[in-house]
Amino acid sequence: MRALSFGELLWDIIGNKEYLGGAPFNLTAHLAGMGTEVSIISALGRDDLGKDALFDAEDLNVDTEFIQVHDRYPTGTVDVKVDNKGIPSYAINENTAWDNIDVNDNAILRIKEKSWNVFCFGTLAQRTETNRKSLWKIIENISFDHIFYDVNLRQNYFEKEHIEKSLKASSIVKLNSEEAVFLSQYIFNGTMTEKEFAARLSVEYGIEIVCITRGENGSAVFYENEFREIPGIPVKTADTVGAGDSYGAAFLFAFLSGKSPSEAAAFAGKIASYVASQNGAIPEYSEEIIKTIENIKI
């Protein structure tokens, strides 16, 4: 199984501690932790944070071949504040390396040398024209079995045309319940249930699978014109940073391993709940979680 991600690779500053992150990277790292061969297309600065990020990414078994190193731009950072319920808020610094991912023709040729089961991307990295050009160069020139779009809206860093274009290109889409409410108004100009919203997304944009995460209340998955709900797993939350990213990784891992979307969503819920119970977006897996992952491979 081989996956390719595109987007932000940065450091989350939580309290006085730095955690390597960025939604696409978190997803990629979790896929790597489950035994998937993974690469990420991103950019870092030629600074200490960039060097540390490359080292840590490689230590997590993430292929760094397609990570650019900029002399002009610093490695990205995000100031994260976590409330007493473990819910994070973000101050995302601009004009950093990952805002300037420039995929040239040579990179496209190197990417084409491999076969890919899935390509993963989100919304935030599309906030710059340079990144948008690179993203669509990849999607329009490389063949993927599936394209996974994690909507993952952050602050005001999104535009309707970019969201709709992303939806049209994707076979699997993930978003949370708050984003589902927002997008039902933003795209369809009306309030609807999650089931109605997922069905309309699927029909109007040709999406095979729609996943809606609900935090501690589980998730729902729409496919083959059916809406299935998966119950949540109660845990004591440390912070929810990266929990949604781990859900996406786990869903893809299980689905591409041959599980049904419902089975994949149930597995994803277990992984996301564990991550929410730990500090940081990419915690070390417990023995129980490792056994759960191994069972998916059987």
Image (tube, helix red, strand yellow):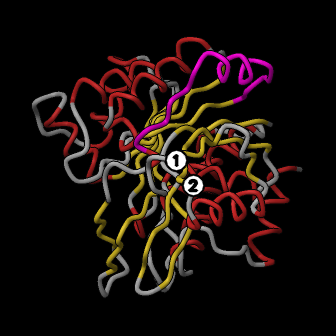
Direction from residue 270 to residue 140 in the image, left or right: left
Quarter of the picture holding the N terminus: top right
Q: Quadrant of residue 203?
A: top left
- Compared to residue 212, the image places residue 87 above or below, namely below
**Residue at position x 71%, y 16% from top?**
109
The percent position of residue 234, horizontal first and vertical second, equals 49, 78
- The residue lying toward the viewer, choosing from 98 and 158, is 98
Asked if disc 1 and disc 2 are in contact, CB closer than 8 Å, the reply is yes
**Residue at position x 76%, y 57% from top?**
58
User: Circle 1 sits on which residue?
Assistant: 71
Q: Is residue 107 magenta?
A: yes
Range of residues picked out in magenta: 99-117
Q: Is residue 74 magenta?
A: no
Q: As shown in the figure, which amino acid type bears the numbered disc 1?
A: Asp
- The residue lying toward the viewer, choosing from 188 and 141, is 141
Q: Which mark is residue 220?
A: none
Q: Secondary structure at mark 2?
A: loop
Q: Secondary structure at mark 1?
A: loop
- The residue lying toward the viewer, choosing from 121 and 264, is 121
The percent position of residue 262, horizontal first and vertical second, equals 59, 45
User: Circle 2 sits on which residue?
Assistant: 46
Earlier sequence position, callout 1 versus callout 2:
2
Q: As shown in the figure, which amino acid type bears the numbered disc 2?
A: Arg
The percent position of residue 16, horizontal first and vertical second, equals 44, 87
Q: Residues within 10 Å of mark 1 (few under 14, many from 20)?
A: few
- The residue lying toward the viewer, choosing from 157 and 168, is 157
Could you tell me if residue 270 is visible in this image? yes
- Extreme right residue here? 298
The percent position of residue 55, horizontal first and vertical second, equals 72, 62
**Residue at position x 45%, y 56% from top?**
74
Could you tell me if residue 228 is visible in this image? no
